[in-house]
């Protein structure tokens, strides 16, 4: 990532840009057989819906820009569920999703995380430590895979402490 990129909290002024980024990309979430029932989901992608989430303490939105272009965004619900993670088609395969995810991890800390992933995004989430918890499913016209990433616990016991307690080379 070059030095002209900025990762920041999204604001209400970003609602239109977030909607414009997510709406065309989210269409791959729709189940072709039941897509007509996905109107409620699509309604959550409007600028007004984004503005409501941006104003809600339940959600945190982070975005990455480069040269004043929105490259990607992540939205966390309740600090532990990835509500949205989208990267602009023109800036994919540049580590943007990982940078957004690592920023969310830094902000929200060590805990269990969940996501309802599109089938095409499953490999990305697997690289982030997520595992599928159920087979792909369709709810209200939206097809997804429920995934979970367990809280990673930092080792508490230091090597030096272990060396003092454990026998060395078979000696007690």
Image: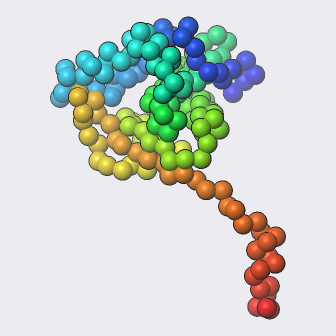
Residue at x 73% of width, y 18% of height: 4
Classify the position of the N terminus by image quarter.
top right
The answer to whether one can see residue 16 in this image is yes
In the current view of this chain or complex, which residue is farthest to the front? 57
* Rendered location of residue 142, percent (x, y): 28, 29
Q: Residue furthest bottom?
A: 171
At a point 48% along the width and 21% down the height, the residue shown is 56
In this view, 86 is above or below 159 = above
Number of numbered tags placed on the structure image? 0
In the image: residue 153, left or right of residue 120: right
Measured as percent of width and height from the top left, residue 133 is found at 36, 50
Q: Residue 163: x and y, percent? A: 80, 76
* Relative vertical location of residue 104 with respect to residue 63 in this rendering, above or below: below
Residue for point 39% across, 37% down: 117
Q: Nearer the viewer, residue 10 or 145?
A: 10
Give residue 64's quadrant in the image. top right
Give the image's coloring scheme: rainbow
> Residue 98, can we see it?
no
Quarter of the image containing the C terminus? bottom right
Image quadrant assignment for residue 100: top right
70 shown above or below 170: above
* Residue 164 point in image, percent of width and height: 81, 78
- Picture quadrant where residue 155 is located: bottom right
Query: Quick one: 63 or 30, which is closer to the camera?
Result: 63
> Position of 164 compared to 48: left or right?
right
Task: Tell me which residue sits at (42%, 39%) in the image.
Answer: 115
């Amino acid at each position: 990532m070059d030095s002209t990129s900025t990762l920041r909290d999204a604001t209400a002024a970003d609602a239109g840009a977030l909607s414009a980024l997510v709406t065309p990309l989210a269409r791959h979430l729709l189940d072709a057989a039941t897509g007509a029932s996905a109107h409620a989901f699509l309604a959550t992608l409007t600028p007004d819906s984004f503005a409501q989430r941006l104003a809600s303490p339940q959600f945190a939105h982070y975005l990455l820009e480069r040269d004043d272009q929105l490259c990607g965004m992540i939205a966390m619900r309740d600090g532990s569920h990835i509500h949205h993670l989208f990267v602009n088609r023109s800036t994919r395969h540049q580590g943007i999703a990982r940078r957004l995810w690592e920023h969310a991890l830094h902000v929200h800390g060590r805990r269990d995380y969940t996501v309802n992933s599109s089938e095409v995004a499953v490999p990305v989430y697997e690289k982030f430590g997520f595992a599928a918890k159920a087979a792909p499913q369709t709810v209200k016209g939206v097809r997804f895979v429920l995934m979970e990433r367990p809280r990673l616990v930092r080792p508490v016991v230091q090597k030096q402490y272990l060396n003092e307690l454990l026998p060395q080379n078979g000696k007690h």
